[in-house]
């Protein structure tokens, strides 16, 4: 009877896995649960139970029940450690699976604990398992914004990957570049992205070129950035997704802004602004919109277009209600001899600057309030 029970548990589990792969969650749960029921009459240390738990974990993940998914990944690992030798490839895989699940849901410290527990097993299973472990450690540390540790583990993973066949080195160098980019270590990021280009397929190179173009912009090298854009990106612009379109137009505008080519800066910054405003649900773009509005307003001031500049700064208040913004609005009011509104906006700037301990803005605002209050009175 135990043999039949094991056979049925295995078959139902396999059928459930097939339904999982087909995306039929209901049937997957139905068959995997039946498999688990058949194990109740079997010894508690049989390996099939661990595989059933893992299939349940993947199925819960598929239907976005992440807490249950985490629960069953951990059960699968725990059962495996009790029922099987602990230095097998399956052990390494299960540690990695639990860790990746935790990382995916931003439980980085716990993920790192599991990955470090798996290091010895991974080392015993060969270079490929160890490479995966180092890469996953890098991802978890990156999530914690510990970019130095992430860089160290990524480099370990890359060093191993260079000795292995059929490993996507391009992706690893992109990860390295992204990590250095987030750490604002731009020279190292450029080195990593350049290495990624060496190993990338032609269809993957465009996104890397965009990153390099952005770094040249951030480094305030406008001519180099614009030349790079014309050489590597311009002819492929129709292949780029919406977010990258926004980033490209924004950075082109910034480069022309650095070069004091106001007409071109206005053109590209407004193109980026229009795309951002058409995609309001993406809040991550607000920081770019804030900078765009600041630069557009600054250009309007340089061109003596006081009303246009005031309109832009007023729009900026929706996203960035700071002392500096109110101060600029107040100064533009004064420029247009609207002293009453100017003083009111400067007083708002004063209160915000005082609260933020912004001594520089506080000094400027105080001087103007003292100077122009007499005109109002």
Image (tube, helix red, strand yellow):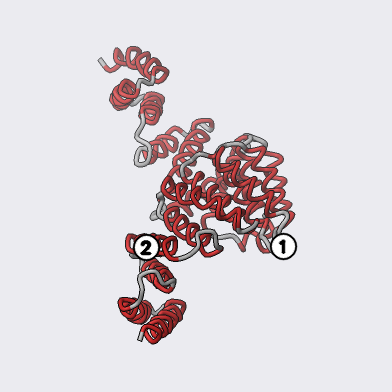
Q: Give the residue number, with chain letter if any, for mark 2.
A: 75
Q: Give the residue number, with chain letter if any, for mark 1.
A: 165
Q: Is residue 119 left or right of residue 343?
A: right
Where is residue 335 drawn, in percent x and y? 41, 25
Q: Find numbered disc 1 in the image and state the secondary structure of the residue it sits on.
A: loop
Of all residues shown, which one is farthest toward the left? 377
Q: Is residue 322 left or right of residue 95?
A: left
| Residue at 55% across, 55% down | 121
On screen, residue 141 above or below 91: above
Q: Nearer the viewer, residue 41 or 206?
A: 41
Q: Earlier in the sequence, mark 1 or mark 2?
A: 2
Q: Is residue 296 left or right of residue 372?
A: right
Q: Nearer the viewer, residue 239 or 58?
A: 58
Q: Identify the image quadrant of the C terminus.
A: top left
| Residue at 56% across, 51% down | 120
| Residue at 39% across, 39% down | 316
Q: Residues within 10 Å of mark 1 (few under 14, many from 20)?
A: few
Query: How many angstroms separate mark 1 from mark 2 (CA)?
Result: 33 Å
Q: Find numbered disc 2 in the image and state the secondary structure of the residue it sits on.
A: helix
On screen, residue 245 above or below 41: above
Q: Nearer the viewer, residue 145 or 280?
A: 145
Where is residue 250 drawn, in percent x and y? 55, 46
| Quarter of the figure with residue 7 | bottom left
Q: Which numbered dot is residue 240?
A: none
On screen, residue 110 above or below 38: above
Where is residue 309 drawn, in percent x and y? 44, 35
Q: Identify the image quadrant of the N terminus.
A: bottom left
């Amino acid at each position: 009877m135990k043999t039949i029970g094991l056979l049925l548990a295995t078959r139902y589990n396999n059928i459930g896995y097939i339904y999982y792969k087909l995306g039929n969650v209901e049937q997957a749960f139905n068959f995997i649960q039946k498999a688990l029921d058949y194990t109740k009459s079997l010894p508690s240390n049989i390996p099939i139970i661990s595989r059933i738990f893992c299939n349940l974990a993947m199925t819960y993940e598929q239907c976005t029940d992440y807490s249950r998914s985490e629960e069953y990944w951990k059960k699968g690992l725990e059962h495996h450690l009790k029922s099987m030798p602990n230095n097998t490839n399956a052990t390494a895989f299960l540690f990695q699976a639990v860790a990746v699940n935790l990382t995916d849901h931003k439980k980085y410290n716990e993920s790192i604990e599991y990955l470090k527990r798996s290091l010895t097993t991974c080392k015993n299973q060969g270079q490929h398992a160890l490479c995966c472990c180092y890469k996953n450690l890098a991802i978890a540390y990156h999530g914690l914004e510990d970019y130095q540790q992430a860089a160290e583990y990524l480099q370990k993973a890359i060093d191993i990957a260079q000795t292995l066949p059929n490993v996507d080195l391009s992706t690893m160098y992109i990860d390295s570049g992204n990590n250095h980019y987030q750490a604002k270590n731009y020279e190292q990021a450029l080195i990593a992205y350049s290495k990624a280009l060496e190993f990338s397929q032609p269809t993957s190179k465009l996104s890397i070129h965009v990153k390099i173009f952005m770094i040249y912009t951030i480094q305030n090298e406008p001519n180099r950035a614009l030349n790079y854009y014309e050489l590597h990106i311009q002819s492929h612009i129709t292949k780029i997704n919406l977010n990258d379109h926004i980033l490209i137009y924004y950075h082109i505008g910034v480069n022309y802004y650095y070069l004091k080519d106001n007409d071109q800066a206005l053109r590209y910054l407004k193109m980026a602004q229009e795309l951002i405003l058409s995609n309001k649900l993406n809040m991550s773009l607000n920081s770019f919109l804030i900078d765009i509005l600041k630069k557009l307003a600054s250009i309007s001031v340089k061109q003596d277009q006081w009303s246009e500049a005031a309109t832009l700064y007023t729009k900026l208040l929706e996203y960035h209600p700071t002392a500096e913004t109110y101060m600029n609005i107040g100064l533009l009011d004064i420029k247009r001899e609207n002293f009453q509104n100017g003083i009111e906006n400067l007083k708002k700037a004063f209160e915000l600057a005082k609260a933020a301990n912004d001594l520089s803005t506080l000094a400027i605002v105080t001087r103007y309030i003292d100077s122009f209050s007499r005109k109002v009175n």
